[in-house]
Amino acid sequence: MKPLTPSSSAGLGGPAWLIASRSAAAEAFATAAMPDPRLEQWRYVDLEFDIADYQLAVTPGDAQFEADAGPTAGRALVVDGFITELEGLGRLSELSAPPASPAIDTGADIFATAHTAFVRDGVVLHLERNSAESDTYLMEVVATQSSTLSFPNLTVIAEEGSQSSVLVFCRSADDVDALVVPRITIEAGPAANISITIVQEWGDMTRALAQLHTSIERDARVHLGEVGLGGVYSRLFFTVDLQGSGAHSEISGLYFGDEDQTLDYRATINHQAPRTTSNMFLKGAVEGSAHSVFTGMIRIEEEAQQTSAHQTNRNLVLSRDASAESVPNLEILANDVACGHASTVGPLDQEQRYYLTSRGLDRDRADRLQVRGFFEEAIGLLPNQAVAPGIRRIVATKYAEAQAAGRA
Amino acid sequence: MNALEIKNLDASIGEIKILRGLDLSIPKGAMHVIMGPNGSGKSTLCHVLTGKEEYEATGSVKVQGVEVLGTPTDQRAGAGIVQAFQYPVEIPGVTLRDLMEELAGDQDDPDAFWARVDRKRDEIKVGRFMDRAINLGLSGGEKKRSEIFQISVLNPAVAVLDEIDSGLDVDAVREVAEAVEAMRTNELAILLITHYDRILRYLKPDRIHVMMDGKIVRSGGPELAAELEGTGYEAFRKVAEG
């Protein structure tokens, strides 16, 4: 394993632009500190680890494709940060210049800086103008080695009028104490129509801090589906920039934390152009001593007139020691907009329980049906429905196990 | 043996006493109607019968000779008493078919159960919302039909219909009444709660009971509804107090 030093960064190779970009970030990383928990973006969580406790793997572990994604238009397998299989997709290191997508502000966050400094390579999906692909592109991200950290990277460049869907599937075995810092960048050109579904099934000891940045141009649409199921700590920090008039962002997802998991969602939706629309619908549950955080910022710039932005986050708290934070925020600088947010945190509904038990189901079964129904609304909205049966199964098993263990 | 036998039933919610020594027996195959003004305790009676948690109740409620007071709600359904709710709750993400699948798992003969589901679905015309979330976005009449459908499928010994006619227009009341009459068998005892006599024009109840202040103050045949129409509830209050 290699420590996170400038020389480790320099040894990663690739084209000159990538080496230069890593080198600048490696320098910044050398003096960067773990996040200040008083900062708004890090409130409500306790990281309980140091990035310096992890090192870069020198070879990838053994892993194969596992996701049941149906026919694929292209696929990539990324193991411990190494691209070990690649079909029908490109590599970041093959680009002669950096992708035009805006870089994430490396000054803000040690994990973003580390990603830029130590990313080994990235997967690139470049969709040509007006191309339409009905099969999905699959990227599987696997962590196999404890004490390692990795920086999986995906860049989607969708040119004008292109259409496609992407599935990102993340996993590790339960005994893998690894740190994974993925970055996904999506750039949707005018009138492009892109969907991306991210399913996170990290093992019990894995920590993940993912960054997702989406920019959406005129009349384009990006639908993000997010499913957070695993990891002792799993964070998704995402920003959506609605840059062109008529741009639309759709976000649907669910998360279910059990035992001692922390699931941490930080969303920022920036409406930067007129007639842009965004809609977010996230549902989560926590049991045991699990903790979830959702903070959502909708920011509407002065020029973004006639926009509409809606955000819904509903949380089920299934046991006494579990907790959920739901913090929606609006910052509106324009005057002709329609915005709304709904946020709830609460236990299972007593009236639903009464109704279902009155039909002869015992309390545990009635509650299982209610939990299934709670998530069903979110599962039904995921852009990739091929993953839905597997997610239903995992959610049902998680809750049944919690009931059996007396945690919910 | 009566299908339902209630003796000296008291019930309260917190400090508030709602039922005060209520007695009522319904033989199998009979339909009894309870009428009463707002606040007389009609809905409380329904919820106490099906074991809603917030009510404290004492006395006796026997379903087919088995005491159910103090047992959890699901066991009461198992004992044979099921309620059609006045305000059935919405269950997001759970369809009527999902519920039927859950119930089918408990059946000794699932094939016979599904045959009954299919038959009742067509009779009560709920096919259109079998695959929609329970009660979500249904009209008042559709909700009542869904409730009657569930009871018909469960095939209990006692059906409690709480204001099955509330919030419906004239045509819907007639439709619901027809569905209630269609439920009737020689085995099923029906307790129908209503505020108005409107639905009684389309039904053939065996007994009518007037409920006030948490107990039955008068019982009689179907003609009692007409008398009530003429005098109003207040006349009965005076009789009860006198």
Image (cartoon, coloured by chain):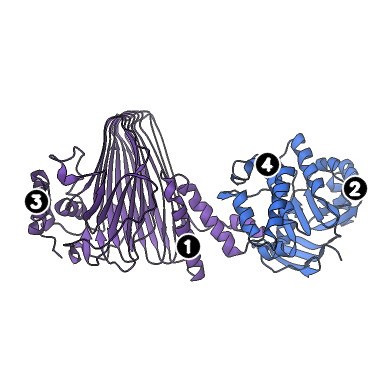
Chain colours: A purple, B blue
Residues tagged 3 and 4 counted as in contact (Cβ below 8 A): no
Residue at image mark 4: B142
Image coords of residue B21 (percent x, y): 80, 64
What's under tag 1, amino acid-wise?
Thr
Q: Is residue B39 above or below residue A5?
A: above
Residue at image mark 3: A23
Q: Secondary structure at mark 1?
A: helix
B27 relative position to A210: left or right? right
Q: Are marks 4 and 2 on the same chain?
A: yes
Residue A397 - label:
1
Q: Are marks 3 and 4 on the same chain?
A: no
Marks 1 and 2 sit apart, C-alpha to C-alpha, by 54 Å
Q: Residue furthest bottom?
A: A405
A32 relative position to B3: left or right? left
Residue at image mark 2: B222
What's under tag 2, amino acid-wise?
Pro
Chain that bears disc 1: A
Q: Secondary structure at mark 3?
A: helix
Q: Are marks 1 and 2 on the same chain?
A: no
What's under tag 4, amino acid-wise?
Glu
Residue drawn 8% across the image and 45% down it? A16
Residue B119 - label:
none
Marks 3 and 1 sit apart, C-alpha to C-alpha, by 45 Å
Image coords of residue A343 (percent x, y): 44, 48
Chain that bears disc 2: B
Marks 3 and 4 sit apart, C-alpha to C-alpha, by 67 Å
Q: Nearer the observer, disc 4 or disc 2?
A: 4
> Where's the N terminus of chain A, which quadrant?
bottom left
Looking at the image, can residue B173 be seen? Answer: yes
Count the numbered circles shown: 4
Q: Nearer the observer, disc 2 or disc 3?
A: 3
Marks 2 and 3 sit apart, C-alpha to C-alpha, by 92 Å
